[in-house]
Structures are given as structure tokens and as C-alpha cells.
Image (spheres, grey):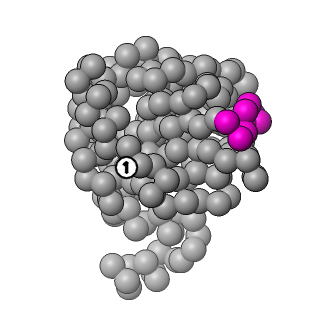
Amino acid sequence: MVKVASPKVITKVFSEDDYAALRLLFQNPKSLEYQEGFSRYVVADNSLPELQKFADKLTNIARETFGSKELLPTYTLFSHYEGENPAPSLYKHKDDNACTYTIDMCLYQTDPWDLYVEDEAYTLYPNQALAYFGNDQMHWREKFPKPGSQYVAMIFFHFAEPDHWFFTKGPSYLSVIRKEMTEEEWKARS
Ligand SMILES: [Fe+2]
């Protein structure tokens, strides 16, 4: 059973060298896939395996922070928010993907854009992160403060226990969780 606790700020996520190496991976964020609904440019670790190495490096910190000896990385997403029409937004939600344990890290930004978890606002600066429970705690952001001149880049690192469906059935099982197909349809395809 996962024990849900209050979010925690991690004040220095990576060493200077690792942070610099991570920063170098995203020199041209606008070449990435654009998601209009969120006004953001994204890439996940399944298309950028280097991201997985950083999730692996974070695993010990995640285990300490969340008090689990066995949690493992599930998936990681880089996201650069920028734009005016519409401005980036993140509605109030809980996650349905393999996000039991979430570490949202600020990679770079012109100005902060507070992250809210369960009614508390958190201001993050580069190489800082917020650790919280993505499947259990409501999270969102208020209005993008300076559309037109602002951008904010985050990396979302996710972890789960080894008996999570992500590991026992595989990432494609998300379609069943989202009720896009039945268990039987999913079995027939996999
Ligand atoms: Fe989320």
C-alpha cells in the first residue's frame, strides 16, 4: 500500500555536472512535438532514451523521499511551456498513468510558474523539484504569469512499485485503465 504524505521540495536534484548534461539535451525545444491543448513542446523517454539515465540516477533520491525501498522509474517527460494564444495551462487533475510517485523538476525558466498540490502553491527554480503523489493528490497551475515573454521547462519523473500494472502488464495497459479498450481486447492485441 502506498502511504500518501505531504509534497516535499527537493532543493538540489542533480549534481552540477549532471544538471549541465541534462540541460544540453534540450537546446532546441521547439523542434519537439507540440501539444496545442497545453501550449507545450514535449518528448518522453521512449523517444529520448538519455532521459532514462537521469531517471535511474534519481531512483535513490525517490526511494528516500517517498519512503519506498523498491520503487522503480516508469516514464519521464520533458515539457517546455510557451505561448500566448492560448497561454499554457494545466487544469486541476490527478494522473491515471504510472505516476504513483512524481518528481516534477524545473529545468529552466524565464520566470517561475507555481505548481499547486492539494491547495498549496510551490515555487520552483532550476534544478529544484517537487515530490508528490500524482495518482492521489490533485495538482494544477494557475494562469501563466507572463504569456508572450515567458517560458518554463519541466521534467516529470515518475516512479511506481514493482507490482504496478506498468511493470506486470506493460505500458500499453494504460488503454484499459483509460477504458479505451476492454481487458479482452487488450489481451488479443498483446
Ligand atoms: Fe499530472
The crowd level at tag 1 (other Cα within 10 Å; few <14, some 14-19, many 20+) is many
- The answer to whether residue 182 is above or below residue 170 is below
**Quadrant showing the C terminus:** bottom left
Tag 1 secondary structure: strand
Q: Residue at x 67, y 58 (%)?
A: 37
Query: Does the magenta run of residues contain 23?
Result: no
Whether residue 64 can be seen here? yes
Along the line of sight, which residue is nearer the eye, 130 or 153? 153
For the image shown, how many numbered marks are present on the structure?
A: 1
- Counting from the top left corner in percent of width and height, residue 119 is at 73, 25
Q: Residue at x 41, y 49 (%)?
A: 28
Determine which residue is flagged by label 1: 75
Residue 22: quadrant of the picture: top left
Q: Residue at x 31, y 27 (%)?
A: 19
- Counting from the top left corner in percent of width and height, residue 9 is at 49, 17
Residue 16: quadrant of the picture: top left
- The answer to whether residue 55 is above or below residue 96 is above
Residue sitting at the far front: 149
Residue 87 appears left or right of 98: right
- Counting from the top left corner in percent of width and height, residue 3 is at 48, 28
Does the magenta stretch mainly form a helix, a strand or a loop?
loop
In the rendered structure, which segment of residues is drawn in magenta?
142-149
